[in-house]
Image: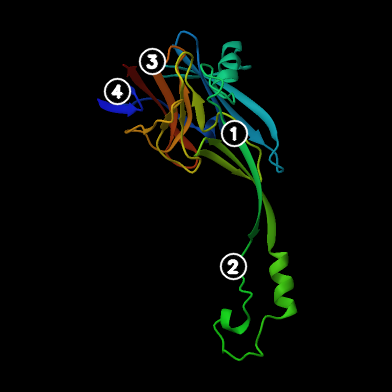
Amino acid sequence: MVILVVAALQISLASPQPIAEVDTSKLKGEVARLAWSPDGSDLYLQTIERDNAGVVKSAKHYVISTAGKTIKGLDQEPAWAAKYWSWKSAQASPAAPAFRIDVRQREETIRATSTPTGGAMARGGTANPTDGTSFEEVANAANQTQKAIIFTLQVRDEKIGEWTNEAVIPGVNFGWAPAPLSLLAFARRDGGPLVVLDASGGKQELAGTKAAVLPAWSDDGKRIAWLERKDRKKYQLMIADIQMQ
């Protein structure tokens, strides 16, 4: 049992338990949604496939039994999963509207390669002052740069996710706890443990979690599920019991 302290809130997290392996080479596509059924007996999983432009072209639907640990295909997303996802991935906490995620945008110029533009010295040549940067080198360097549009999701001073030249998909790396809990769980997009934030500014990393994706609190707030990335195609669905005092 691991004891965690989030500001004035004390949380106990039981050892995470593996429920099922999720192999996207078999299920097809990238994982996109994870949602609890109201009674906590099932988890809905959605995978999506994109076209060459990155636009979603299809979605596949699955239900995973938390007891039987089986994965079954569905024809469509259950109504309960859509309802769950609407508050789980919202911009503000279901319990505290002022506890919210800000979306920030900036533009940066990035270099596609490390082509030097410092003339002969940058290329490891002589220090002859006549061997400066040529017009050709400047033109080549300009052709190898591009504008990057970067979207950042942030709660106060805490960055919870960043997307570069791609659409932000709410809920993929974060999940609100159900009311009346004013809590947010998130993980870095490049892989990391689950981190919990509370409305008062408290922050706590959840020991025993790693490479987490799609954190999802159960409707009663007593359990949390997530996918733990194993490799490029495989994940392990994990569930842990939590208690709050």
Label of residue 222 in the image: 3
* Residue type, mark 3 in image: Lys
Identified at 61% across, 65% down, the residue is: 113
Q: Secondary structure at mark 3?
A: loop
Residue pointed to by mark 4: 14
Real-space CA distance between mark 3 and mark 4, rounded to the nearest whole angstrom:
11 Å
Q: Which mark is residue 114?
A: 2
**Label 2, label 3: how many angstroms apart (C-alpha)?**
50 Å
- Residue 197, horizontal then vertical, whole percent: 43, 29
Q: Which mark is residue 102?
A: 1
Q: Distance from label 2 to label 1 (Cα)?
A: 33 Å
Mark toward the start of the polypeptide (4 vs 1):
4
Q: Earlier in the sequence, mark 2 or mark 1?
A: 1
Sort mark 2 into few (<14), some (14-19) or many (20+) by Cα contacts within 10 Å: few
User: Which residue of the protein is positioned furthest toward the top in this rendering?
Assistant: 39
Of callouts 2 and 3, the N-terminal one: 2
Q: Neighbour class for label 4 at 10 Å: few (<14), some, many (≥20)?
A: some
The amino acid at mark 1 is Asp
Which image quarter: residue 169? top right
**In front: label 4 or label 1:** 1
